[in-house]
Image (cartoon, helix red, strand yellow):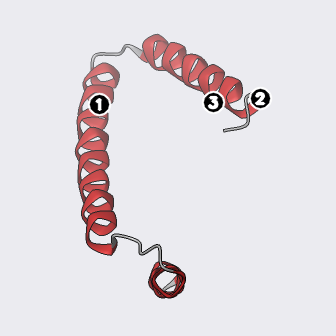
Amino acid sequence: MRLLKATKAAAATGSPIDLHGTLVSSLLGAVFAFLAGLVALKWLSAWLEQGRWYLFGIYCLLASGVVFYLHTKGY
């Protein structure tokens, strides 16, 4: 709803927003994020089924470090 309102407001000021392009890129992003999640879950399941819990621990530490770094940079 906010995007539709912003589109109408932007069109009224003379700088229209490409609603179609925005929706298409959002849907593509959602589809690729879903597929990446499936691949990551498949990979993680394979690790855990083989008893490689230490790799999961390393992954968690690295991921938390990246998130903390991005947080300190303002993302």
Q: Is residue 45 shown above or below 8?
A: above
Q: Earlier in the sequence, mark 3 or mark 1?
A: 1
Is the Cβ of the residue at disc 2 closer than 8 Å to that at disc 3?
Answer: no
Q: In front: mark 1 or mark 2?
A: 2
Find the residue positioned furthest to the front: 14
Identity of the amino acid at label 3? Val
Q: Which residue is mark 3?
A: 67
Identify residue type, mark 2.
Answer: Thr
State the residue in front, 34 or 72: 72
Q: Is residue 56 left or right of residue 70?
A: left
Quadrant in which residue 19 is drawn: bottom left
Residue at point 28%, 50% (across, down): 34
| Image position of 67 with respect to 33: above or below | above
- Mark 1 and mark 2 lie on one chain; the one further toward the N terminus is 1
The residue carrying pointer 1 sits among few (fewer than 14), some (14 to 19) or many (20 or more) residues within 10 Å by Cα, namely few
Element marked by disc 3? helix
Q: Residues within 10 Å of mark 2 (few under 14, many from 20)?
A: few
Residue at mark 2: 72
Marks 2 and 3, the one that precedes in the sequence: 3
Task: Specify the amino acid type for callout 1.
Answer: Ser
Q: Alpha-carbon neighbours of circle 3 within 10 Å: few (<14), some, or many (≥20)?
A: few
Image coords of residue 62 (percent x, y):
56, 17
Give the CA distance from mark 1 to mark 2.
Answer: 31 Å
Separation (CA) of disc 3 from disc 1? 22 Å
Distance from disc 2 to disc 3, alpha carbons, whole Å, reads 9 Å
Q: Is residue 53 left or right of residue 43?
A: right
Q: Which residue is mark 1?
A: 45
